[in-house]
């Protein structure tokens, strides 16, 4: 049986449950293509920043995974961007601690904007050398663009980058 879930939405028993699930600027009507667009906006913001050492996003021409992404995701990728904060592990930790809008989580790809710094979270027990050995850069931040206002997301990242490099 082939079911079409393109118009699927969550059903809540009451308004309070709905409000707990969708709070603030959350917009349940947004789709994955809009998240990719927001992700691309953030990629261009990061690529133009002197406070960022590198950016990885499979939807960006020139990225190491661009051809693979175009082959397997021809309609677009997503809003998850990986980048390095100039200044290494310590600067990346300061960046994370300075975020105001983004949620600090151990996962990404949520409806809300989320960020993860593996070196201080999921891989915190490892030294920088061990991180590099297993392919995780100590300055790596995985940033998942949510459905909040794009200008607010970019402003949050920019102020956190400034604080991390102050």
Image (cartoon, grey):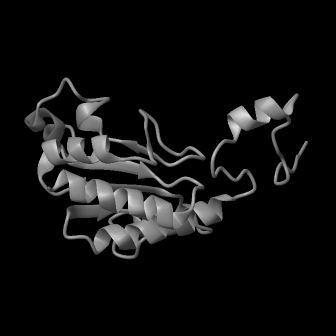
For the residue pair 1 and 21, the one nearer the viewer reads as 21
18 sits to left or right of 74: right
In depth, the one of 151 and 53 nearer the eye is: 151
Q: Residue at x 50, y 49 (%)?
A: 113
Give how far across and how far down residue 162 sits, in percent: 23, 59
Q: Which quarter of the rendering shows the N terminus?
A: top right
User: What is the quadrant of residue 165 in the picture?
Assistant: bottom left
Taking depth in this image into account, of 114 and 78 the one nearest to the observer is 114
- Identity of the residue drawn at 29% across and 37% down: 118
Q: Where is residue 20 in the image (x, y as percent from the top left)?
A: 70, 32
Residue sitting at the far left: 129
Residue 108 visible from this viewpoint: yes
Percent position (x, y) of residue 65? 38, 63
Residue at (14, 56) in percent of width and height: 166
| Residue at the farthest top position | 125
Can residue 136 be seen in the rendering of this structure?
no
Horizontally, residue 47 falls left or right of residue 90, namely right
Quadrant in the picture for residue 6: bottom right
The x, y position of residue 51, in whole percent, is 20, 64
């Amino acid at each position: 049986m082939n079911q079409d879930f393109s118009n699927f939405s969550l059903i809540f028993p009451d308004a309070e449950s709905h409000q707990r699930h969708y709070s603030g600027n959350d917009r349940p009507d947004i789709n994955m293509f809009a998240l990719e667009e927001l992700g691309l906006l953030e990629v261009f913001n990061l690529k133009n920043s002197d406070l960022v050492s590198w950016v990885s996003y499979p939807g960006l021409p020139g990225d190491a995974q661009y051809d693979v992404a175009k082959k397997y995701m021809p309609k677009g990728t997503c809003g998850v961007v990986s980048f390095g904060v100039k200044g290494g592990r310590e600067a990346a930790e300061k960046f994370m601690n300075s975020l105001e809008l983004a949620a600090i989580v151990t996962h990404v790809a949520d409806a809300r904007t989320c960020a993860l710094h593996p070196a201080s979270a999921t891989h915190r027990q490892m030294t920088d050398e061990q991180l590099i050995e297993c392919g995780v850069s100590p300055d790596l931040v995985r940033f998942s663009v949510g459905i909040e206002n794009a200008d607010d997301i970019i402003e949050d990242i920019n102020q956190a980058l400034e604080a991390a490099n102050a």
